[in-house]
Amino acid sequence: TVLVVDFGAQYAQLIARRVREARVYSEIVPSTMPVAEILAKRPKAIILSGGPSSVYAEGAPALSREIFEAGVPVLGICYGFQIMAQALGGTVANTGGREYGRTPLTVTRPGSTLFEGTPEEQPVWMSHGDACSAAPEGFVVTAATEGAPVAAFECDEKQLYGVQYHPEVLHSSYGQQVLEHFLYRGAGLEPTWTTHNVVEEQIAAIREQVGDKRVICGLSGGVDSAVAAALVQRAVGSQLTCVFVDHGLLRKGEAEQVEKDFVAATGVQLKVVDAQKRFLDALAGKTEPEEKRKIIGREFIRVFEQAASEVVADAGAHGEAVDFLVQGTLYPDVVESGGGTGTANIKSHHNVGGLPEDLQFRLVEPLRKLFKDEVRKVGEELGLPSEIVWRQPFPGPGLGIRIIGEVTRDRLDLLREADAIAREELTVAGLDRDIWQCPVVLLADVRSVGVQGDGRTYGHPVVLRPVSSEDAMTADWSRLPYDVLAKISTRITNEVPEVNRVVLDVTSKPPGTIEWE
Ligand code: XMP
């Protein structure tokens, strides 16, 4: 394992991902972890991340210099680089030469461990106020920029390396290569961490945890729960029962994907609960967004609990207990909740699969160590249908929060058709992986006048909301090609009766959220 010590900047996760892209397994630890504890994890190498502070600032996160004396290869990045410089006797000072953004870097020792085979001039991403003006004794300065006379230093003998810039961001054109040079040449690691190994490892871990007990898993139709379930199925086969609550708020074809394609691909035992009427009844007459969300969340929990207790009773009749619940928790959730304690970490209104604590199951979380893109690779490795593996994010409350106004069966059907057309055309245009997602929203309480054939129409508008984003926290509206928009508009107004107008949402987030409710 390579440990990435997180100094509180947003870059630690990115560094960990880049290391994994180099096929070396990595994990993140907080900088508050005592060095002895970090070393007790027996890391093969350590990377110190960037951070927001100046090494001279009061309360700046520090690191005991023992970390550099344990014989473990270390790469310091940005703040981590400065900490390293300072701890080992170099000079870090506020030189006034603040650099931010894309900066030209000159490699002063071509052929060094970090820079071999990369150009002598290369663009890098800088973000610093202080700069290192003298490298520690025994270190060779291997690169410089205008504002940072020591932009990289290396000591092969001690296997210690540092760079002032951020090699993990794409703006540093040779950053990945430099990281890989550290891992392979500096630390002598082999690129052996593959999706295949992850699958093998997780299957062994699940078998070990679950033993001969029974397991239950709720499927949402999304990629995380599907991949988690498929892994558990591989590990313990018929001990797993999946429950799929069909609340009627999924998009066209999605329920079938779960019930037919997913089952065919994995062979899981699936209990389907058709709760469409129950959800519609509960939503009747409701128009306030938060109220709709709460109703959907509440009903989901009730239906799932009921189904789970039936599965438990069923097992009981055969003298068996259901001890475990599968949850598709991902690594970023684990990191953000401070390393995780093995208990459920459920974002209250953002995860309809969230269950109350009085359901006494122990959790199986086979995706706890994975990033989203790795989950998709595992899904592919397990042979899941690509419609599920590459599905765009879809909110737990589903189409219920994409109908502005009361949710009814007719309106759901209408929105499902319009949404299916938009998705189809985006796929045909090859835009699926360019956009983050494209909600289609029905303004059910709005009508406008139109003309079709020879007649006047008085129908509803739908809104297209294509967005680009990295993480859904912020987003920009996607500049889709006009001809694709035109095709979607023509087809929706022709093929979906009741819809006579298609409009485009050109709001970024903030101020608009991605979903309309
Ligand atoms: P907003 O609308 O908050 O959405 O900008 C950000 C991202 O989260 C998705 N979303 C949800 N996902 N349960 C979920 O699992 C929810 O209740 C929920 N609400 C919004 C949304 O589709 C977007 O990707």
Image (tube, rainbow, N blue to C red):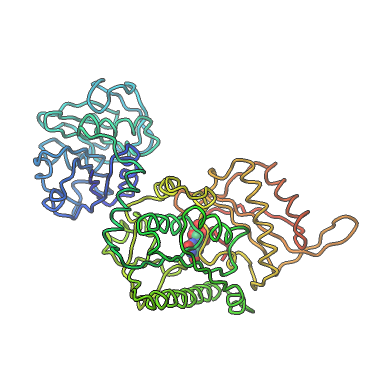
Where does the image place residue 104, in percent across and percent down from the top left?
A: 35, 28
Q: Which residue corresponds to the image point at 19% horizontal and 55% vertical from the top-left?
A: 32
Task: State which quarter of the image contains the C terminus.
Answer: bottom right
- Residue 246, compared with residue 66, is above or below; it is below
Task: State which quarter of the image contains the N terminus.
Answer: top left
Q: Is residue 237 visible?
A: yes
Q: Which residue corresponds to the image point at 40% horizontal and 66% vertical from the top-left?
A: 347
- Residue 71, compared with residue 421, is above or below; it is above
Q: Is residue 343 left or right of residue 312?
A: left
Viewer-closest of 428 and 148: 428
Where does the image place residue 399, in percent across and percent down from the top left?
A: 59, 64
User: Toward which corner of the image does residue 76 lie, by quadrant?
Assistant: top left
Viewer-closest of 201 and 162: 201
Where does the image place residue 368, in percent across and percent down from the top left?
A: 33, 56
Viewer-closest of 252 and 501: 252
User: Toward which corner of the image does residue 20 lie, by quadrant?
Assistant: top left
Viewer-closest of 278 and 16: 278
